[in-house]
Image (cartoon, rainbow, N blue to C red):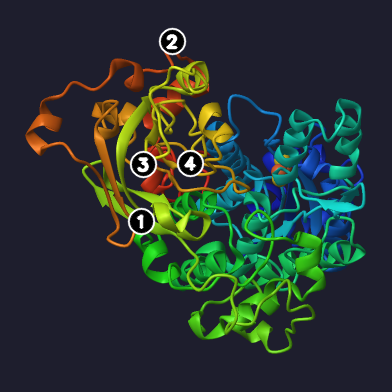
Amino acid sequence: MGLRSAQWYAGDDRNSYIHRAWMRRGLPANAFGGRPHIAIANSASDLTPCNLHLDEVARSVAGGIHEAGGIPLNLPVVSLGETQVRPTAMLWRNLAAMAAEEMLRANPIDGVVLLGGCDKTIPALVMAAASVDLPAVVVPGGPMLTGTFRGVPLGCGTDVWRLSEEVRAGTLSAAEFQRSESSMIRSKGHCNTMGTASTMGLLAEVLGLTLPGIAGLPAPDSRLLEGAHASGVLAVELVDQQRRPSGVVGRGSFLNAIVALAALGGSTNAVVHLLAIAGRLGVELTQDDFDRTGSGVPLLVDLQPAGRYLMEDLHRAGGLQAVLREVRDLLDPTAVTVTGRPLVDYLDDAQVYDREVIRPRAEPLRPHAGIAVLYGNLAPDGAVIKPAAASPHLLSHRGPAVVFDSVEDLHARLDDPALDVTADSVLILRGCGPKGYPGMPEVSNMPLPAKLLAAGVRDMVRICDGRMSGTAYGTVVLHVAPEAAAGGPLAKVRTGDIIVLDVAGRRLDVDVPDEVLAARTPAPAAVSAFAAPLRGWERLYVDTVGQANTGADLGFLVGASGDAVSRDSH
Ligand code: FES
């Protein structure tokens, strides 16, 4: 089969002349004579600090592509800095995916190397590559090194809250708090806890989309550049063999990712991202697969926020492959990688070098990790909870609802001394789903009322139609579907209704007779918490986004169009 780029460059007519001539600027004539053109989809940006170093990674990738006889082409893509973009980076994930997909298809390229790091960047690029289905390999940008402050390690995200509490308690000055900023962000790379960026970088490898052994390499580690170079070489091979995402990532790959997600103690955000990627590939995957396949898997990795260590420690202790070896019997042995060999083939030599960081299967941190999926009259299409992150005594709970219609409503009333709330109450935050906010922000792990905190309460049942940060913990039921703004029953709950949570029975209900609930009018504020008229991307997003249980992709983006260009104007 000829190269796709030859549709632009081959021949001696006027059009091929134009295509070649405008690309000439430094490229030799033989660049257009059968050498694969490989895009380096590069999410480096000054405004995505976690991906800032990807230009350097791209140079190593380009070296590998050159060495293998290909032509590397830098392709800047929409980049999302999790801490910077507002109102929430998730609003833009599908935009980034759509833009990348279209540019990969529109341009004369034969394959692509995907460079991501910060939370949404790898999911967006993988969604794009799945839909255009060009030969593709991911190079995860890797986590930053462990910073220390006053002699102790700092975990990104998790320790911000700890230090700010110290300031409130008077044990840390405001000036010292500020000084800790650059200690926390010690080096290039993404957040170093087992948050969403770390999770998705590692899961890209489990899905088979990276050179095996590369995920989790710290961003400043020279071996990342070595791996990037090898990924460039591999990209040329992928084109040669026409090995595309649809031929690499199957249902077994996703089930392997679910097992890994549990063993790693990864972020709940992986649920929506994996569902969205599966939707692009046309692979059958449901939220229930996460429960069925992952909930019995033990938590083996002692990383923040669930545990003590950070990504640099995981790498030192043996890394992803050492973790996967512990659960090898749970992995689908037929699931392959971009190299053409099965994922499990790469686990034979994996070793654990620190049993404090990577626990043996027989001595896990928790016997059952993973995600539980709940159904009931509050969540007809499901909701998720991470039982290992919850307080055991709250996993079966009845309590009166205290309902907030929006994030603004929550902040306005939560700390009101007059708020009628006790430790047995169930906090409900709605209007935070994909359509409601819009963009499904990470707010489900809502703070506890000040007066209960002062009384020593440290956890309560919380229910929300939004997401939560990969660094967050607590008895939090999230991703409730349908969300309030999409007509879900969450919009009909009233303060004082009794909520029944039964994680063992996988139920989430409001103890209100069905006919009474059906007759209620949804709270207007919960349905349209975001009242401003929408235009542009937000308009398109709200009108077409799906619910969390299907990956919160835009309806018309689900599936694949392949690499064929619809029309050729020449
Ligand atoms: Fe980029 Fe955390 S802010 S990974």
N-term-proximal mark, 1 vs 4: 1
Q: Which residue is mark 4?
A: 566
Does residue 520 appear in the picture of this structure?
yes
Q: Which residue is mark 1?
A: 373
**Mark 3 and mark 4 residues within 8 Å of each other at the beta carbon:** no
Which mark, residue 480?
3
Between residues 370 and 500, which one lies in front from this camera angle? Answer: 500
Name the secondary structure under disc 1: strand
Which mark, residue 533?
2
N-term-proximal mark, 2 vs 1: 1
Residue type marked 2: Pro
Residue 537 drawn above or below residue 11 = above
N-term-proximal mark, 3 vs 2: 3
Q: Residues under labels 1 and 4: Cα distance?
A: 40 Å
Please name which of the two marks, 2 or 1, marks the residue nearer to the observer. Answer: 1
Residue 239 drawn above or below residue 305 = below
Rendering coords of residue 560 (x, y %): 45, 51
Q: Quadrant of ligand 1?
A: top right
Q: Judge: label 1 CB < 8 Å from ligand 1.
A: no
Q: Quadrant of residue 263?
A: bottom right
Residue type marked 3: Val
N-term-proximal mark, 2 vs 4: 2
Residue type marked 1: Val
Q: Residue furthest front?
A: 455
> Callout 3: 10 Å neighbours few (<14), some, many (20+)?
many
Tag count: 4
